[in-house]
Amino acid sequence: MMSTSTANDNRQVAVFDDRPFFEKALIYGVRNRIIDQATIDRIQHDAPKGMVQIAEHFGTQYLRPNIEEARVRIVRLVSLYLEEFSGGDLAQAARSLRDNSFLSHSRGGSDLLKRLWAMPEDSSIGLLVNRSQKSFLADWSLRTPDEYRQVLEQRRGNQLTISAALWFADRLGLPRAAMVTVAAESVIRSGLLVHLDGRSAFAFPNAAEFAAMLSRLRNKGVTGKGRKRLQEILKDLPPAFEPVVAHELGRLETEDLRKIGDPARPLGELMRELEPLYFLRDFGPEDAGHFDAVAATDWHRITDGKTDDSSLLTIFVCLAAGNPARPTLTRSAARTLISRARSGGFRKSPAVDFIRTLAPYTMQEDLEALWNEFFPEAETYLLDASDTTLADALSFLREHCNVV
């Protein structure tokens, strides 16, 4: 009868057995009389030749560290191929070692890594692989089959996402040449939104069309016609793409439509937030006017139509202190702003975000320059703890901002 100690030892061996799969398969084959001495002799004859070839490819055969590293590489390559080929079945792996040469297993492992290298690292369409195949093999021939399988799953997912995006592009008449380093998810999302809108043409939108879609969805919501058009396109979707598209549709419905339907969110801000998530045709500075047209209402409402530096700096200072944006401050409001800045912080980023979100495109660069130049001095005066009466800070605000 096995003692408790012996049983525990066996369980520990099973749990912590991190030997290469090649070694496990070889030992299993010998113990179960699948592999005979002739097979072992053949492996012992072929392995050194393979090690020298690998050492020469990645370094030199004459340096001992290269040979030792080559030994690790060839065992990893053979193990990778055997484990993938057999699905982890030791008996099947042992029969493969018996029936095929050792070097063919090494080449098989190398071929698996070459195919992994050729698969997309992310879901960008048209993104060229920058890393050389040799560099990739040098790295991955020292990694484990578990690492291989993890990255293989990721890259298969990337490939599937790209293929789904290309399917939408073909359905909506978008030339593949028009998509260079484009996120595949954005193409899928745009394709879904076009159908869900129910009123736009069956084509990827440009900036103006995208703005119109958001405005319609905000005012009227998703119509029955839009749902029907979406279901029609999903019926034609190849089954392999269904999980990818379902994921993007879920994000569109739970995240984007919720934001679109929020009346408290300025439409210009919404457009600038959502635009990076969608593929738009011909988007560039020439399209910025379309965004400006939508954002103009919010910009003029907040700035009260004022364009002078004093009014704009007053708005920026309010935002930096965490206050609502105002183009003019009373003396009392200015004192409150200074106190709040000293207790809660005075930050540059809220004003920068405001400029990039709502300011007319042609004004943004100049407004950021104005704020970046003004901010350090404002920070010095407004946060000066020695100015206990706030007199210097108030004087600074009166000089540069609108304080009445």
Image (tube, rainbow, N blue to C red):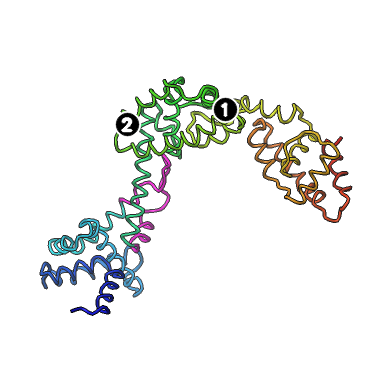
Q: Which circle's residue, 2 or 1, is located before the other in the chain?
A: 2
Q: Is residue 259 above or below residue 148?
A: above
Tag 1: amino acid:
Asp
Q: Which residue is mark 2?
A: 237
Whether the magenta-drawn stretch holds residue 136 is answered as yes
Left or right of 311 on screen, residue 98: left
Which residue carries the number 1 mark? 287
Q: Is residue 127 left or right of residue 300?
A: left
> Residue 39 or 134: which is nearer the viewer?
39
Query: Residue 111 magenta-drawn?
Result: no
Question: For the point 45% across and 37% down, which residue is it?
Answer: 251
Please state which amino acid type lies under the numbered disc 2: Leu
Position of 292 with respect to 369 (left or right) is left
Viewer-closest of 145 and 338:
338
| Range of residues picked out in magenta | 115-143
Q: Is 364 positioned to the left or the right of 21 in the image?
A: right
* Foreground pick, 334 / 134: 334
Q: Quadrant of residue 237?
A: top left
Toward the viewer: 336 or 379? 336
Q: Quadrant of residue 124?
A: top left
The location of residue 193, given as percent across then percent down, is 45, 29
Element assignment for label 2? loop
At x 77%, y 49%, the residue is: 379
Pick the quarter of the image with the N terminus: bottom left
Number of labelled discs?
2
Distance from the alpha carbon under mark 2 to that under mark 1: 32 Å
Q: Quadrant of residue 95?
A: bottom left
In percent of width and height, residue 208 lies at 54, 24
Q: CB of mark 2 within 8 Å of CB of mark 1? A: no
- Circle 2 Cα neighbour tier, 10 Å, few/some/many (<14 / 14–19 / ≥20): some
Q: Is residue 254 above or below residue 100?
A: above
x then y, percent, for residue 229: 38, 23
